[in-house]
Image (cartoon, grey):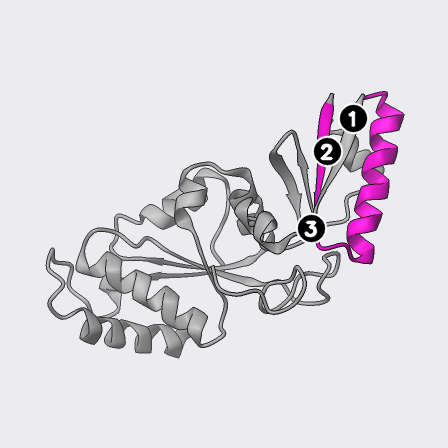
Amino acid sequence: MKKIQILGTGCAKCMKLTENAEKAARDAGVEFEIEKIQNINDIMNYGVMITPALAVDGVVKSVGKVLSVEEIKKFL
Amino acid sequence: MSEQKEGCCTTGAGAGDTCCGSGAPTLIVACSGGSNAGQVSNGIMIELDRKGLGNAYCLAGIGAALSGFIESAKAARTVVVDGCPTGCAKKAFEKYGIEPSLYFVVTDLGVTKAHNFDKLPEETDVALKAVLEKL
């Protein structure tokens, strides 16, 4: 089970990244759960200073970008 | 790290694809080492943050290979301040292929490295002025 984490306070770009991550995981046939990390202090505890950010199983893969479905698949 | 100005955005906001609009944020990193020069670098980082020129950021997070710190440094504009030519902060960046946007070495800015802290405020002022002239 992959844990896909979306770090961001919930703006439109964070939601788009969430949508793309869900589609990427489904397309890849990966068992997954999505965790939204929206509290600013929790986000900063990851060292993330620009959002949206994507982490997989606690490892930050991308900061400050709405990754495409194909880009996200490479991290799964 | 300094306070967040609004939402999830740092001072200066983010690049086009971020939550925050235009312009990459500036992260300021100092070696903060165990000499007067290292501590002057730390003082410069704090003063640049106070002046709103960027956000003080943790070199230790990069040194510790924490993914969020590394990826944030890759995505941001970075100002790196080392205390001496040993260049620990710059080398920590290089380890992850990150080229600082601006780079300063305190001993190039009128401060002689020593292992005493007697003149720290004065030395910080001298070096800070030199940095501000180059920003």
Packing grade of label 2 (10 A; few <14, some 14-19, many >=20) is many
- Same chain? Circles 3 and 2: yes
The one of A14 and A24 positioned closer to us in this rendering: A14
| Residue position for label 2 | A4
Residue in the picture at 49% in, 72% down: B53
Q: Amino acid at mark 3?
A: Gln
Task: Describe the element under mark 2 as helix, strand or loop.
Answer: strand
The chain letter for the residue carrying disc 2 is A
- Left or right: where does residue B25 sit relative to residue A11? left
| Residue position for label 3 | A38
The one of B39 and B113 positioned closer to us in this rendering: B39
Between circles 3 and 2, the one closer to the viewer is 3
Q: Position of residue B52 (x, y in %)?
A: 49, 74
Disc 2 or 1, which lies upstream in sequence? 2
Q: Is residue A75 visible?
A: no
User: Which portion, as a residue range, is magenta?
Assistant: A2-30
The chain letter for the residue carrying disc 1 is A
Image quarter for residue A34? top right
Check whether the beta carbons of the residues at disc 1 and disc 3 lie within 8 A of each other. no
Image quarter of the C terminus of chain B: bottom left
Between circles 1 and 3, the one closer to the viewer is 3
Task: Describe the element under mark 3 as helix, strand or loop.
Answer: loop
> Does B65 appear in magenta?
no
